[in-house]
Image: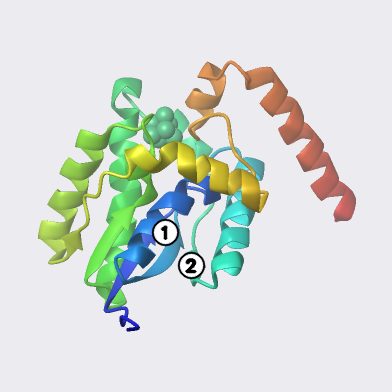
Amino acid sequence: MKIQKTEEILLHSCCGPCAEYPLQQLLAEHYLPTLYYFNPNIQPQVEWQRRYESLAKLSDLMALPLVAVGSAATEQWLALPDQAERCRFCYRLRLEEVARYAKENGFPTFTTTLLVSPYQQRELIVEIGQELADSYGLNFLAADWRPGFRAGQELARTHGLYRQRYCGCIFSLGESSFNEQIRAEHARLEQGMSDRI
Ligand code: SF4
């Protein structure tokens, strides 16, 4: 018997690879996901674009809608008064925009692919997500997708998606052991973009 999908859900998506496993789970649970790409923390802009294109490829492959807004906001991160609080700021900024969009567009529930990553601060994400859900009159799906992180990365490899090696903000790029290699890739991509203009 074919089971009808019953509930729309807005899935904040930080990138293609991290969306793989959550999408499998949501579809298995009969949700109708819409991908929402709002990630001003992904810096510089060339990296924002690269992760967006990877997510757009997945959205095409799975025939799921994708909404993308904003751009890299490096200056906003450089102006933060307390670097120790940068992740709290980052999660709240992104999830608040997702909650706002969900409310305005009739999604009863929202969640985030950040919940698949063992490298993110799950408790803090859930705390902020639930607080925003309460204040916007929505549901926050606090799934624990971390057991599927590796499987999602493998799926991303199969789909030929770009897989990044740093969290996103300019500070996390500086902390990455691949820092120099990534900056060289960015320079090449930027050069390629300017050659096309
Ligand atoms: S390390 Fe990651 S979660 Fe924390 S501020 Fe940077 S991009 Fe955001």
Which quadrant of the view contains residue 1?
Answer: bottom left
- The number of numbered badges drawn on the structure is 2
- Residue visible at 41% across and 69% down? 34
Residue position marked by numbered label 2 in the rendering = 67
* Looking at the image, residue 68 lies above or below residue 90: below
Marks 2/1: CA distance? 15 Å
Which x, y percent locates residue 20? 48, 52
Which x, y percent locates residue 98? 33, 59
Which x, y percent locates residue 123? 20, 35
Structural crowding at the residue carrying mark 2, measured as other residues with C-alpha within 10 Å and reported as few (<14), some (14–19) or many (≥20): few
Judged from the image, the secondary structure of the residue bearing numbered disc 1 is: helix
Tell me which amino acid carries mark 1. Leu
Between residue 16 and residue 93, name the one nearer to us. Answer: 16
Which quadrant of the view contains residue 104?
Answer: bottom left
- Residue visible at 44% across and 55% down? 38
Of the residues tagged 2 and 1, which is closer to the observer? 1
Which colour style is shown? Answer: rainbow
Between residue 189 and residue 117, name the one nearer to us. Answer: 117
Task: State which tag comes first along the sequence, 2 or 1.
Answer: 1
